[in-house]
Amino acid sequence: MSATGTRPTLAGISEPAAAAAISAACKTLYLTGTAKIAASMAEEAARARLSHQGYLAEVLTFECDQREDRRRDRRVKEAKFPRPKRLEDLDLAHIPDLPPATMTQLAGGSWIDAGEPLVLLGDSGTGKTHLLIGLGTAAAEQGRRVRYITTAALVNELVEAADNKELSRLVGKYARLDLLCLDEVGYVKLDTHGAELLFQIITAREERASIACASNANFSEWGQTFTDPRLAAAIVDRLTFRGHIINTGTDSYRLKTTRQAQKG
């Protein structure tokens, strides 16, 4: 557009000059996807006898798709999952308490939009962490802000923030997430101070933003983790109210998978 704000006059331009102008414009506008495919798409458009408007639509649609892919990848990276896990890689036959219809509902993420909690209970190796990461990944790819962290790591982070007088900032940071994936609840015994700090995170998200947690201990055993029975009861109450509770059972999913692979 010219300095006067009117549309510039279209004039004849050679193909090399046009390619150079497109490259320069893409660099200025940060159109990284378009810069790579503009020339090849122009050739395809010519072969398909697309109009100028049709070609422009194809290029801009490609750029939008590329940006969405990068945004999705960035959300997954920001979630800090320890390893890639996808829901479609999990054999639901090993988790009778999770029928396909329930899995489809959870994967859709409506429970996250409603601020409902999710608790995964089961013995070690039964697929809890796979489910937790898989659901978190699906949520991140749908555009939600997700963070995965173990209970012990979160408590350590909270204690350090409290010591540095930055607790309010950190609690606010976790409160703004769409989904907090809290793994290994009950694996490590927490002192009273650590348990109270964790309770602040849970309270800050109560009925507003979802927490998905995984534990190998039944609710009746959480008092051993949080030391104070009243605090343990309050945490259980907040993580189960209007929540989804999935029992992954006692049979090790990893052990079954290994044995099947050996038989195969």
Image (spheres, helix red, strand yellow):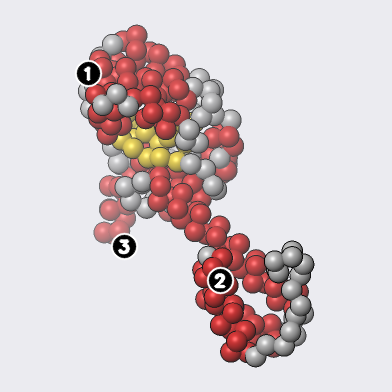
Marked residue nearer the N-terminal end (3 or 2): 2
Apparent side of residue 1 relative to residue 62 in the rendered image (left or right) = right
> Is the residue 5 above or below the residue 71 in the image?
below
Marked residue nearer the N-terminal end (1 or 2): 2
Kindly identify the amino acid type of the residue bearing the numbered disc 1: Asp
Helix, strand or loop status at disc 3:
loop
Which one is in front in this view, the residue at disc 1 or the one at disc 2?
2
Which one is in front in this view, the residue at disc 3 or the one at disc 1?
1
Identified at 65% across, 67% down, the residue is: 60
The quadrant in which the N terminus is found is: bottom right
> Is the residue 137 above or below the residue 204 in the image?
below
Identified at 34% across, 9% down, the residue is: 230
| Mark 3 and mark 2: Cα distance apart in space | 52 Å
Kindly identify the amino acid type of the residue bearing the numbered disc 3: Gly
Residue 263 on image: x %, y %: 28, 59
Identified at 33% across, 37% down, the residue is: 149
Circle 1 sits on which residue?
191
Residue 221 on image: x %, y %: 30, 19
Quarter assignment of residue 231: top left
| Mark 3 and mark 1: Cα distance apart in space | 47 Å
Circle 3 sits on which residue?
264
Residue 62 on image: x %, y %: 61, 68
Circle 2 sits on which residue?
26
Identified at 49% across, 22% down, the residue is: 206
Marked residue nearer the N-terminal end (3 or 1): 1
